[in-house]
Amino acid sequence: PHLAQRPTIFPTTTPLPTIAPPATITPAPTSAPVILTVAIPNEWTDTVTPILQTANQTQPTWQWELLATDDPASALANGTAEVALLPDTNGTAVWREPLTLAVPFTHPRQNLTQAEADTIIASSHPDIRLIPWTSLTPEWRALPIDGRFPPDADYPYQRTWSLVAQAGPETAVATLAAHWQTTPPPWQPVHLAAVGDIMLDRGPGYLLTTGDLAFPFAHFADELAAADLTLGNLESALGDTGQPEHKSYTFRAPPEAAKALALAGFDLLTLANNHALDFGPEALQQGIALLQAQGIATIGAGSNEAAAYAPFITTVNNVRIAFLGYVNVPREVSGFDTAVWTAKGEQPGVAWGTPTRITADVTAVRPQVDVVVVVLHSGFEYIPTPSPPQQAAAEAAIMAGADLVIGHHAHILQGIAFRESGVIVYGLGNFVFQIDGPPETAVLHAWLDKTGLRQLTLTPAIVQPSGQPRPATPTEAQAIHHTITRLTTSLNQP
């Protein structure tokens, strides 16, 4: 009989397909970044370097290298650089620089109208020069045009700085320009306003205790607050503690004075003077605490030697500035000698300004900052000529590297000395002071940048019998400018 086929115990094996090993994947080559060089003026390296670093981090397609040179235009023309920063409107605009109409500092002209300025630019003037802001030096004074100063945003005369490129890297330049345009230019200055002696005892002090905190600075609060930094000399103790010293005059402003100074826009006060310890070291330290509570820094005195001589260092508009304060005044007629208040070791006191000490302090701080300002309380009272110790201290500061010395103590205006590496404003007189004496004073305005002091101007003022300053009338202002010109001319004879 037919037998059925027995089932296969193991199913027929189907051969597995042969699997080829995976192919080796060769990564696509990464494109090397295109290296581009931008040429700039030598003095702007510190400002431009961070711009290129940011651009290189955010856009790896191009890598920018910096060429700092005296002649960026030649570097572009000969192919050393693909791009150059030039005062030219034919490239991609990144910065605008003021063009000043300037006169010598002692020139009688103080301002211009827009129409006058347009005429001078069109036809020239024997005494007035058109000078780029970055070429202006303190011996020259930029004239405001209808009240507008060159650093003001609405100042009418500007030249454009542009990135000018060879043909090809237009896209790269546009990307770089976007970073560049958000960076303040290296010539953006710090506007410093400074005044002389502020004595908030007597009549002004009484009014402060009644709640009239605006009275002392009512006519100048807006002007002072408009500056980036405002500086003054506090010519008294401050507070409600201590006993008067045995000397001819002792002054103590009430505690309310600290808030009045803050409301007026003061950022920094020097205490290095012959009234700082009129009510002893406890009052000195109370005054410092009251000022600090209002956000006002101090220099020139402190709880010990280190604090008294310590600089105040701040950065504004990318400019790093150090302020140092000193006093060096003669013995009083009564016999009192301010030098006994000199801070030593852990003893509270003032910073006594010998040329040797000033030289050491300025030399120490100079490498840390862009600008050094020394504030010096010195001279003979009511004598317009700087005293020998005053001159020695001020000149030592300049020789050591200070850019600007600002002085007071004489209770009158003194002249301005222009030196190759800095400027000495010997005396700003009184500012708020109820005192018998010449009423003429001025507010100093100084513009500082990374290269030092760019320019100075003065706003004439009159101290009224109440001790409150007011703006000078045109006739008074002309006389004040004439006085400063005469004194300044005598200090700058060959």
Image: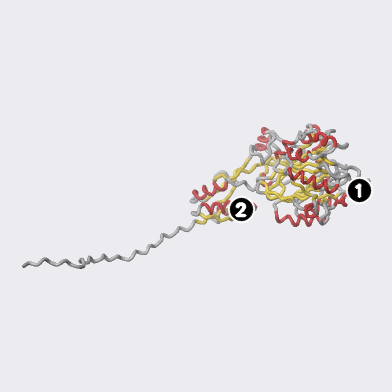
Residue 226 on image: x %, y %? 70, 39
Q: Amino acid at mark 2?
A: Asp
Q: Is residue 482 visible?
A: no
For this orientation, the residue located farthest to the front is 1
Q: Amino acid at mark 1?
A: Phe
Mark sitting earlier along the chain (2/1): 2
Residue closest to the eye, 302 or 388: 302
For this orientation, the residue located farthest to the left is 1
Residue 435 on image: x %, y %? 87, 37
Residue 452 on image: x %, y %? 71, 49
Residue matched to label 1: 336
Placement of 443 over or under 301, stated as above or below: above
Q: How is the image coloured?
A: secondary structure
Residue closest to the eye, 330 or 165: 330
Question: Do the residues under discs 2 and 1 have CB atoms within 8 angstroms?
Answer: no
Q: In the picture, residue 252 is in which quadrant?
A: top right
Report crowding for label 2: few under 14, some 14 to 19, many 20 or more residues within 10 A (C-alpha).
some
Residue matched to label 2: 71
- The quadrant of the rendering that contains the N terminus is bottom left
Q: How many marks?
A: 2
**Element at badge 1?**
loop
Residue closest to the eye, 242 or 57: 242
Dot label at residue 288: none
Q: In the picture, residue 109 is in which quadrant?
A: top right
Report crowding for label 1: few under 14, some 14 to 19, many 20 or more residues within 10 A (C-alpha).
some
Placement of 379 over or under 144, stated as above or below: below
Residue 388 on image: x %, y %? 87, 50
Nearer the observer: mark 2 or 1; the answer is 1
**Element at badge 2?**
loop
Asked if residue 160 lies left or right of residue 102, the reply is: left
